[in-house]
Image (spheres, rainbow, N blue to C red):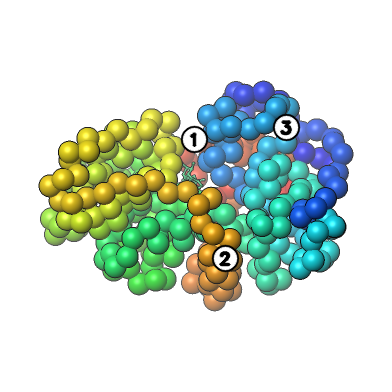
């Protein structure tokens, strides 16, 4: 089969298309014929050596939709021919193995690229980091996870949804996803604009994937009792906070990872997500590339010029 290998850590030139053995499932694994591969920002961090991966060369990660071809001996509830989505350790390939514990059955009517579920599950997890909030701010709101957070927040009736971006050209797209407001860090006055939007109350829930100085400045934009959830650092710079700043308005800052959510909870979210996709209340805007263009596709994501998500079609 064809697969994209990370040959060593580095820029996208280390990604190579190669022929390799088709994997055979064992135990609690299913083997799928991959029909869509979702590119995540984390794939770039793995390639660069920021996030861990085993010995190289190795087939790159991660998120896939596919049709089950065969199953391991300990798999009883899933059958060949079923359409599924999930996260594969080596997903940039024509065929991939998925652990049963990471498999989500997909309704047949949902196209493969729409069924990629990882970012939407992450969005659900983030939206449940606190209760009763009336205002929400998400950074990188035009990105894969950001677009999903905005749409799911709208579908759940959150009154004030503020999408942030570092690129003025993405503001219209953010509003089109359902954000009540879009703000760009390119505007020097963004903090005053935000204050106006919230009538000087601040924001109840801030979700930050960018980090660095932007993440640090957002702590000062929280409402009394407000919470900031750090779930990534796409800028490459961690957020540094002064814990004393949290005292005056009883604010809190936490981290969140989708990997901490239970499988039962993720299966429930997956049902909600697929139902909303079929009803048309949420959608993933996708740009598709062939598997052989994995390097160009990752470069495009890194360039910050895309809205929505990038998908490889094997
Ligand atoms: N905690 C979890 O469970 C979890 C799970 C999956 C992913 N993540 C994290 O979530 C974040 C979003 O992932 P994604 O796949 O949906 O990616 P994405 O948001 O589609 O792409 C990254 C975006 O980050 C923004 N950005 C700001 N500063 C940047 C910089 N210096 N360099 C590059 N990008 C910058 C850009 O948006 P603008 O152009 O709008 O500024 C860019 O489009 C990543 O940090 C990822 O590692 C966390």
Q: Is residue 194 visible?
A: no
Whichever of labels 1 and 3 marks the residue nearer the N terminus, that label is: 3
* Residue 30, x across and y down, in percent: 78, 55
- State the separation of the CA atoms marked 1 and 3: 24 Å
Tell me: 35 left or right of 139: right
* Residue 50, x across and y down, in percent: 53, 29
At x 56%, y 74%, the residue is 275
- Is ligand 1 within 8 Å of the beta carbon of the residue shown at mark 3? no
The local crowd at label 1, few if under 14, some if 14 to 19, many if 20 or more residues have their Cα within 10 Å, is few
Q: Nearer the viewer, mark 1 or mark 3?
A: 3
- Is ligand 1 within 8 Å of the beta carbon of the residue shown at mark 2? no
User: Is residue 173 placed above or below 211 in the rendered structure?
Assistant: below
At x 83%, y 64%, the residue is 80
- State the separation of the CA atoms marked 1 and 2: 36 Å
Tell me: 297 left or right of 216: right
- Residue identifier under label 1: 303
SS type, badge 3 = strand
Whichever of labels 3 and 2 marks the residue nearer the N terminus, that label is: 3
- Residue identifier under label 2: 264
The local crowd at label 2, few if under 14, some if 14 to 19, many if 20 or more residues have their Cα within 10 Å, is few
User: Is residue 41 placed above or below 251 in the rendered structure?
Assistant: above
At x 43%, y 31%, the residue is 236
Residue 173: which quarter of the image? bottom left
Q: Nearer the viewer, mark 1 or mark 2?
A: 2
Q: Which disc, if any, is residue 58? A: 3
Between residues 202 and 262, which one lies in front from this camera angle? 262
Between residues 252 and 15, which one lies in front from this camera angle? 252
* Residue 144, x across and y down, in percent: 50, 51
- State the separation of the CA atoms marked 3 and 2: 31 Å
């Amino acid at each position: 089969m064809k697969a994209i290998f990370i040959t060593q850590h580095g820029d996208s030139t280390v990604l190579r298309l190669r022929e390799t053995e088709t994997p055979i499932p064992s135990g609690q694994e299913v083997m799928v014929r991959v029909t869509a591969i979702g590119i995540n920002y984390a794939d770039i961090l793995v390639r660069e050596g920021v996030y861990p991966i085993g010995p190289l060369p190795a087939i790159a990660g991660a998120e896939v939709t596919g049709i089950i071809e065969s199953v391991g001996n300990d798999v009883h509830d899933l059958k060949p021919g079923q359409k599924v989505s999930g996260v594969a350790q080596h997903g940039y390939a024509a065929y991939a193995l998925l652990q049963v514990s990471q498999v989500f059955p997909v309704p047949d009517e949902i196209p493969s690229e729409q069924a990629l579920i990882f970012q939407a599950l992450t969005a659900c997890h983030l939206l449940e980091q606190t209760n009763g909030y009336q205002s929400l701010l998400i950074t990188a709101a035009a990105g894969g996870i950001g677009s999903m957070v905005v749409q799911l927040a709208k579908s759940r009736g959150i009154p004030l949804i503020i999408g942030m971006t570092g690129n003025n050209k993405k503001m219209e797209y953010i509003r089109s996803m359902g954000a009540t407001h879009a703000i760009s860090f390119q505007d020097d006055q963004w903090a005053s604009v935000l204050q106006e939007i919230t009538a000087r109350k601040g924001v109840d829930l801030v979700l930050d994937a960018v980090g660095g100085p932007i993440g640090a400045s957002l702590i000062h934009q929280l409402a009394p009792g407000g919470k900031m959830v750090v779930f990534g650092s796409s800028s490459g710079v961690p957020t540094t906070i002064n814990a004393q700043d949290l005292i005056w308005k009883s604010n809190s800052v936490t981290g969140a990872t989708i990997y901490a959510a239970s499988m039962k909870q993720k299966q429930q979210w997956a049902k909600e997500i697929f139902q909303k996709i079929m009803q048309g209340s949420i959608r993933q805007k996708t740009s598709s590339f062939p598997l052989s263009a994995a390097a160009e596709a990752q470069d495009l994501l890194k360039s910050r010029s895309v809205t929505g998500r990038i998908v490889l079609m094997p």
